[in-house]
Amino acid sequence: MRSGRIVTKIKEESIVPPKLKAFIINTLRRASYRWKNRGEAKKRYKVKVGEFKTGRAKYGYSCAKCKLVFKSGEVQMDHLYAVVDPIKGFVGFDEYILRMFCDEENFICLCSGCHDEKTAVEREYRKKFKDLEDDDLELELEYLSFIDSYKEKA
Ligand SMILES: [Zn+2]
């Protein structure tokens, strides 16, 4: 169901107290850092950037958006399609878990700047969709083409 009104109704009927829900979500998020598909996906972005004096290869990670290469600690693996769909909002833990512990293909590597930017735009869309009285196909397409701009070009 995509109607904003129906989603709101589901939210109101949730019996999990907000504080417990936040605790569970935080715990799942931390567990997801060890999700194997996340680590596997990061390998796609690994590039050799040089060699140490010892001859050992030096690696960096390229950002899916700006294409610049960064040190491992300077990039984050992000969900291409956000864990909570900005269009539908939170609809339940089954969907939440499946979207968080997703396929390798849904993880993209972003530098901090590009990650912050994507998160901020997603937050804007989240707000827009939440305020809708009914479906807005045009806005959905606009959001999906924003996500497309992060996909790797063949
Ligand atoms: Zn970047």
Image: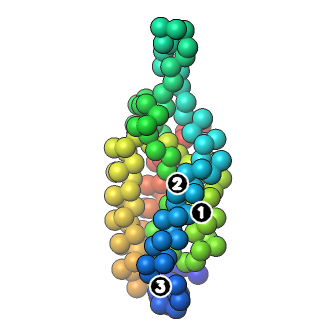
Q: Is residue 81 visible?
A: no
Amino acid under disc 2 = His
Eye-nearest disc, 1 or 3 = 3
Q: Is residue 77 visible?
A: yes
Residue 112, horizontal then vertical, whole percent: 37, 43
Residue 153, horizontal then vertical, whole percent: 55, 39
Q: Considering only vertical position in the picture, is 23 above or below 46? A: below
Residue depicted at x 50% and y 42%? 109
Mark 3 vs ligand 1: CB below 8 Å: no
The quarter of the image holding the C terminus is top right
Quadrant of residue 122 within the rendered picture: bottom left
Residue 65, horizontal then vertical, whole percent: 43, 41
Q: Distance between the residues labelled 1 and 2?
A: 8 Å
Amino acid under disc 1 = Arg
Amino acid under disc 3 = Pro
Local crowd size for mark 2, using a 10 Å CA cut-off: few (<14), some (14–19), many (≥20)? many
Contact flag, marks 1 and 2 (Cβ < 8 Å): yes
Residue 89, horizontal then vertical, whole percent: 48, 74
Residue depicted at x 47% and y 90%? 12
Q: Which residue carries the number 1 mark?
A: 99
Callout 2: helix, strand or loop? strand
Local crowd size for mark 3, using a 10 Å CA cut-off: few (<14), some (14–19), many (≥20)? few
Eye-nearest disc, 3 or 2 = 3
Contact flag, marks 1 and 3 (Cβ < 8 Å): no
Q: Distance between the residues labelled 1 and 3?
A: 22 Å
Q: Which residue carries the number 2 mark?
A: 79
Callout 1: helix, strand or loop? helix
Callout 3: helix, strand or loop? loop
Q: Considering only vertical position in the picture, is 154 above or below 1? A: above
Q: Earlier in the sequence, mark 3 or mark 2?
A: 3
Q: Which of marks 1 and 2 is nearer the N terminus?
A: 2
Q: Which residue carries the number 3 mark?
A: 17
